[in-house]
Image: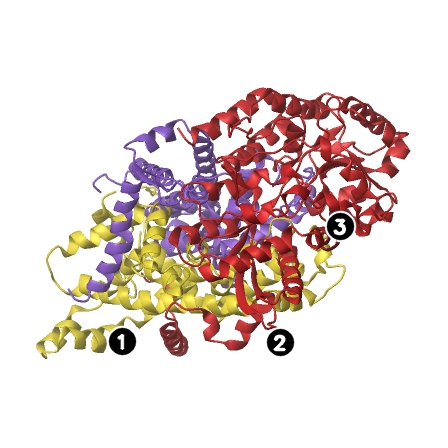
Chain colours: A purple, B red, C yellow
Amino acid sequence: MVFMLPFLVLFGVFRVYAVGYAIVLSFQDIEGIGVTEWTGFSNYRRLLSDSTFFTALRNTALYTAGTLLVLIPVPFILAAVLQSKLVVRQSALRSAFFLPVLTSLVVVGVVFSLLLTTNGLVNSFLGLFGVPAQGWLETRSLAIPAMIIMAFWRWTGINIIYFTTGLSNIPSELYESASVDGAGPIRKFWHLSVPLSKPIILFVTVLTIFGGFQLFVEPLILWGTGGGPGQGGLSVVVHLYRTAFTSFQLGYASAIGVVLALIIMSVSLITLKLFGFFKKE
Amino acid sequence: MTTRARTRLPRSSRHRRRLKLLLLSIIAAGATVLAACDSGGSVSDLEGEEGEENEEQAMEVDPEHEGEEVELEFWTFVDAHADFMMERAEEFNAENSDYNIVINASVADYEDMHDRLLVALQSGAGAPDVVDIEIGRFGTYLRGDVQLHPLTDVVDAHRDELVEERTAPYQLDGVDYGIDYHLGTWVMFYNNAVLEEAGVDVDEIVTWDDYIEAGQQVAENTDAMMTSVETTAPTSLLGLMKQNGGGIYDENNELILDSPENVEAVQLISDMVHEHGIAEAPPGSEHHETAYYEAFNNGEYASVWMPQWYMIRFTEFMPDTEGDMLVRPMPEFEPGGFISTMGGGTGTAITTHIDEEKLDAAKEFLGFAKLTYDAQVALWTDLGFDPFRNDVYDDPALTEPDPWFGDEPVMTNLQEMFDRLAPEYTGPRYPEAIIQLAENVAYEVIEENADPQQSLERGADQVRSVDE
Amino acid sequence: MTPEKKAQVGMAERPEVQMSEPPRGGDGAWPATLHPDGRRRRLNGGPKKVIATALVTLVAILFIIPFYWLVISALRPSERIFADAGNFLPSAVTLDNFQNLFDQTPIVTWFMNSVILATGSTVGSMIVVTMAAYALAKIKFPLRNTIFVGILASQMLPFHLLLIPLFLLMIDLSLIDTHLGVIVPMLAHPFGLFYMRQYMLGLPQEMFDAARVDGASEYRIFFGVVVPMVKPAMATLAIIFSLEQWNDLLWPLIVMRSEENFPLSVGITTLVGLYRPRWDLVMTAAVLAVVPIMILFFLLRKQFINGLGQFGTGAK
């Protein structure tokens, strides 16, 4: 038990106590310096009429959905292709995908504010396919896609690693016998790789939901104050952060945090339910 | 979990792995020692030389000076302000035998510095002695128990000479808490080369109607656009709103974001963009973006309205505009009405966390550095800012014609507007209102042709809901 | 999701234990036409192989380009960084930006701070986590499983909920603007605990029993038997903890206030200033932030990739 002690103390103070503290704060009004007042549910009531919060929530949900759309299928296919014997120099290629994972989000933001400028590389690249130059960082509707492009670059590598770990758990005999029966690579992919990877896909999905809803650094680096054009890049956490440190309303900001936690938990639970996680296997 | 690749690892590579592990643990062990040395202090204890490099922004102490050495920790988010304050400190020390001021300046990013200041004031530790607070954030620090020292007596010593409107934004209940760096008179910058090509005589533009007409001529006769309006910053909108007698707060501390004056001003901007086709969003959506500097430099815009402090952007970032730029008053809404107002601003304040014994020295220095005749001349000569002390406008340094700007005495012309300045008031939710203007109203009206009145009302509702 | 459930799924994948598991979660989804017979057969090579390799390589190149861009931008004269943002080759190359970075910013101090924070939190977390994992995996005590499950469940809460209480706590503990303030709240790392516990469960129980029979104290067992055995797992944790700390922005941004205490991540954001972002300095500082991690990666590539793979999937 003594071995548990350091962990439990640290965990107790900085997690359990802190969560409780946050919940208490969310029922208070802490405004200006040294002014505290109990206000019951008024922070939560205010949240319901805070259209900025709903803008931020919509943006964050869209971003999360977008990252799910690109960050599950693409890394999975890449992992499968890299795993198959169709590709030579697999480990070098895997490293190439993996390098962005090592890069801090600050650096990612810095590089992408350069890549996404109007005369930047992303537009030059799209120009090759006849797509006109876009104001990625200046258009409300493009703020989320711009961040999804960043997320795609940043997280594909780690998801490839997760999927590879999952895929390598599938006994190779299954593939071999499938080949004997004349199944092509695509058939094997659909009928073996995908269904047998369900647990790992579920895991990556939940992780992506977690990451998506906690969006913070990207908008902060791309658009100084974090809101972006027409608040198209504003995320819930940026709104929380600004409420706390620009408006200095720590109580209201805590209420945003509590609601965000509830949202993340419900979305994760719904996802797990949809995947049939709670069914007895 | 075991990946297949892993089980096939040859012996030698397992061995290599063990070596690497050893390497890792050595690094880790070294780190423990480092971490142990680090009892929460600064890293500079660990490596002296780098620590010194960090002090680069601090002044050298003059050992000859007989006065009491007073070190002032100064935070700012503008490099040039740090240089400016250090130079004033040197002058101060040369004239003053009581105190020997040493400025220890630290320059940080805008957001960070303001957030960090709030944290420092709240936590009661680590706050600077003297700090630059941007006008948009000043209101935040005037909430609750104000953690800034009253500077009324410092301002009083010079008040008769000052442009009164510039002290208002930093006051609460008649007490001064901050001193600005400039007046920030709003003006219209014209690229006369473009206007001449379009056949427009700049001095014929008196009212906004004239301006729109000239803009249409520019659109017809040249490839350039008359002007641009920022879509992710509040500046362009705020200038016209205040010029029209609107703004964020009125003198009674009431939020007036959706006042008729503001609606009229934003409607005018909307019309310029959507009806008359003489204005658009700038490249990069702000007037401080490299892409915009390039476009203006290439003659793609005939004019831009910005506060006076924007002048140095032309000389620094738009070299091809030399000799072509003209500084003129804003077109007027009505004859004899407000012609200009003040844009932007940064109030230098003294925090209550300063040592008591340093306070007198800090106040005396601040008055010297920001409000004396010489200091106000230096605002122009060192920083290129328009001073807010009336008597310095007769100084030779300010009456000199400027070849970059049509060989005109720009500052002398500027002073003629001072009796037609619209005042500016700030209030507790000024920061939130600025965010609404920058992120919602400007974008919606310019890019999405939203109705100015509705957009301003939505923004105002948002700001009011903060305190509900 | 019940955390027990989480734990069970994770437990199935124990590190370092050689096993070939039966397929899970298949729900009988593979068609009847496929039945195992264990015969080896080579896949078609030739053109398919070339095309697949070429395609994947192309995508991989897209992933490398931003790094190339970072480096090339750092080498461009500062006024060309944005002007040439779409040009593949620099019109001129200079090291001035690096010179300026060293002259105008306390970059060495920032770098050292990053090193201190990363190593401090790594070493601290490893000690705390390994001890706790040992207790959870090998010592029986009341409420053991409840505690474990509770710790895991806490992972569902977003960190930002804790931001404000932790900030106020740091103020009360006078840890604002200190290295300890950045490190200490993050030491109790639930994912790390989970990973280490699973790893230890995979170790043969006989070893511990033998030591106990010899009458060794739990401390002797821990330092003499456990620590040497879990070194590979500690290496994985070291990589993960140091990477997390090195790249973290939000928490140090809130805790650290004086310039001389910033880590690199915070330092870089200060260079993206309001009126005049110093992109030349930003780019060069970003290069310096990336390079050490890259060097470490290429030295320890297998540990990185396997470690992160195991860590993530082990913790599901």
Q: Which numbered dot is residue C228?
A: 1
Q: Amino acid at mark 2?
A: Glu
Please indicate, yes or no, whether residue B314 appears anywhere in the rendered image: yes
Quarter of the image that includes the C terminus of chain A: top left
Q: Chain of mark 3?
A: B
Real-space Cα separation, disc 2 to disc 3, in angstroms? 41 Å
**What mark, if any, has residue B187 been given in the picture?**
none
Report whether mark 1 lies on the same chain as mark 3. no
Counting from the top left corner in percent of width and height, residue C183 is at 36, 62
Closer to the N terminus: mark 2 or mark 3?
2
Please give the name of the residue rendered at 86% of the width and 33% of the height, measured from the top-left corner: B195
The residue that appears at 61% across and 56% down in the rendered structure is C65
What residue lies at 57% left-to-right and 70% top-to-bottom?
B67
* Residue found 23% across the figure and 59% down from its top: A9
Nearest the viewer among A145 and C95 is C95
For the residue pair B317 and B161, the one nearer the viewer reads as: B161
Q: Which mark is residue B317?
A: 3
The label number, if any, that marks residue B64 in the structure image? 2
Q: Secondary structure at mark 1?
A: helix
| Residue contact between numbered discs 1 and 3, judged by CB atoms under 8 Å | no
Tell me: C48 left or right of C95: left
Element at label 2: loop
A21 displayed left or right of B466: left
Q: What x and y, as percent, mark residue B244?
A: 67, 25
Distance from Cα at disc 1 to Cα at disc 2: 63 Å
Q: Which chain is indicated by disc 2?
A: B
Q: Quadrant of residue C185?
A: bottom left
* Residue C115 or residue B138, whichever sits in front: B138
**Which type of secondary structure does the marked residue at label 3 adopt?**
helix
Disc 1 packing (10 Å; few <14; some 14–19; many ≥20) = few
Q: Is residue C253 left or right of residue B283?
A: left
